[in-house]
Amino acid sequence: MGPGLRRDDGGVCGRHAGMTPLRAGILAAVVTVILDQASKLWLLNGFDLAHRGVVRVTPFFDLVLAWNIGISFGWLQNDGQAAQIALMAVKVIAVVALAIWMARSHTLLATIALGLIIGGAIGNGIDRLAYGAVVDFALFHIDIGGNTYNWYVFNLADVAIVAGVAGLLYDSFLGVPAAKAP
């Protein structure tokens, strides 16, 4: 077989001699942070979403600025300093635990999935440090019978986290060998 590293399940990890699963996971995390922060900076400063209000992109998708001071899906909304510090502490502990898991992972899919989750958590953590809240901007909705049903407002970091969790679930149930948490 050509150049590349073999995974435990016999698949090839990468075509480049240095592309180990860990490097792929780190790359996924770095790319996620860069894309997430670039999109937020552009929407806040270049596009000036705060002054534009709701921007209809398609009949089912809008850009809208929302400052999320809580956790996922706006749960635990609290803008107190103690609550924000507690959320950051939990986030740091989670990122460290996920990084340890990623370093021990042997499957490419699980390692990239963990990188996506770590990158998303870091991207949202940067927001929390910079603004005191997470910048959310993507809103999907559907109109049925004159009623509008909205999904939660989210960002690219959230997309990476959900994709990472989906990747871990796939790898855990259908991957060979399954990824195991430390």
Image: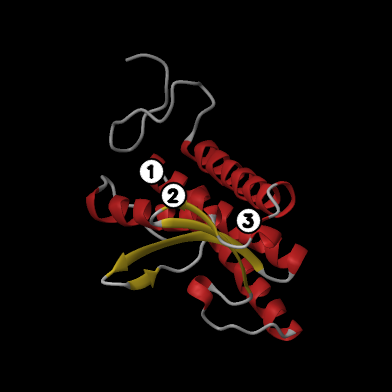
How far apart are the two marked residues, 3 and 2, measured between alpha carbons? 15 Å
Q: Which residue extends farthest front?
A: 146
In this rendering, is residue 13 above or below 86?
Answer: above
The reply to whether dot 3 and dot 2 touch (C-beta < 8 Å) is no
Numbered disc 3: secondary structure: helix
Of the residues tagged 3 and 2, which is closer to the observer?
3
Going 41% across and 44% down the picture, which residue do you hit? Answer: 106
Foreground of the two, 133 or 144 = 144
Q: Where, by quadrant of the figure, is residue 99 drawn? A: bottom right
Circle number at residue 113: 2
How far apart are the two marked residues, 2 and 1, measured between alpha carbons? 6 Å
- Report the amino acid beneath label 1: Leu
Q: Which residue is mark 3?
A: 123
Foreground of the two, 54 or 3 = 54
Going 42% across and 22% down the picture, which residue do you hit? Answer: 4
- Report the amino acid beneath label 2: Ala
Residue 107 visible in the shown view = no
